Amino acid sequence: MREIDVSVITQWVEQLCIDSNKTLPCDLCDKLHAACDAESNKGAKGILMDLERNMAAAKELDIPVCQDTGMAVVFLEIGQDVHFVGGSLTDAVNEGVRRGYDKGYLRKSVVADPLRRKNTDDNTPAIIHTSVVDGDSVTLTVAPKGFGSENMSGIKMLTPSATREEVISAVVDIVKSAGSNPCPPMVVGVGIGGDFEYAALLAKKALCRPSDMPNPDEFYATLEKDIFTAVNKTGIGPQGFGGDTTALYVNIEQYPTHIAGLPVAVNIGCHVTRHKSVKI
């Protein structure tokens, strides 16, 4: 049994909140650069160049890449041989978010109640997802999620008779409905299987998988490519002004489901889909 003081979790959450908001994953930057080089629409290419300049400016000025620094989504993969000491794990995560958003001068966007709308003033509470895995380590991922893209996500409860083409159409329909709202070029996370809520969680997890790491199942890796092609054929383009680049990549996560169902969830990320991880 390995003991980990929750203060370590607080420290890492604080740092990852700042880092993830100021620096995009390298693979996403590479995708954006490649899309800019390949874009045939002159106007769209200009927009993609502007997005690259924005990232360069954020790095030079040490400021967030987007003014919406998101609601903090925190994934904890906890080894079953880990024992946390020193206090509450949930409190430790939220304290890390509180410190990170204060120290990093990040916009605080969380309201305490969904209808009464009073800001908590520290961007807590976080959305916390925990899972138990083998081993004695903890993998911590912080994924700030802006709501321009989150609001455009969706889920469709298809029937088991739905074809592969109907699954693709379900994803494309959600992207079409989103249009320019999620600040394309977007990242498309797709969750297939499970039940209603788990499909949505799979879609969120899919956004955190590196773009250069296709689904390990060749069947789904090919489906990722086909959905990617279909999404880019919509012609929505960068910021919705048309062009070849509506999506930078598509990731799918799948899970077993019931014989009577086929949930398909789509979690859309904007061109600054942010996440940072550490293994403790």
Image (cartoon, rainbow, N blue to C red):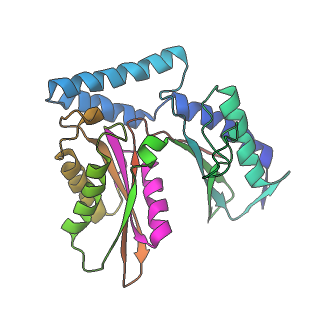
* x and y, in percent, of residue 137 in the image: 67, 54
* x and y, in percent, of residue 266 in the image: 37, 57
Query: 103 or 122, which lies in front?
Result: 122
Q: Quadrant of the N terminus?
A: bottom right
Q: Is residue 143 above or below residue 263?
A: above
Q: Farthest residue in the left direction?
A: 40
Residue at x 22%, y 61% (from the top left corner) = 169
Residue at x 30%, y 33% (from the top left corner) = 239
Q: Is residue 118 above or below residue 203?
A: above
Q: Identify the image quadrant of residue 57.
A: top left
Q: Identify the image quadrant of residue 50.
A: top left
Residue 72 in the magenta stretch? The answer is no
Q: Farthest residue in the front direction?
A: 116
Side of 119 where 234 appears, left or right:
left
Residue 205 in the magenta stretch? The answer is yes
Res. 201 visible in picture: yes
Q: Which residues are magenta?
A: 185-214
Q: Is residue 46 above or below residue 204?
A: above
Side of 54 where 32 appears, left or right:
left
Side of 212 where 10 appears, left or right:
right
* x and y, in percent, of residue 208 in the image: 46, 48
Q: Farthest residue in the right direction?
A: 86
Side of 136 where 200 appears, left or right:
left
Residue at x 19%, y 49% (from the top left corner) = 229
* x and y, in percent, of residue 53 in the image: 37, 18
Res. 141 visible in picture: no
Q: How many marks?
A: 0
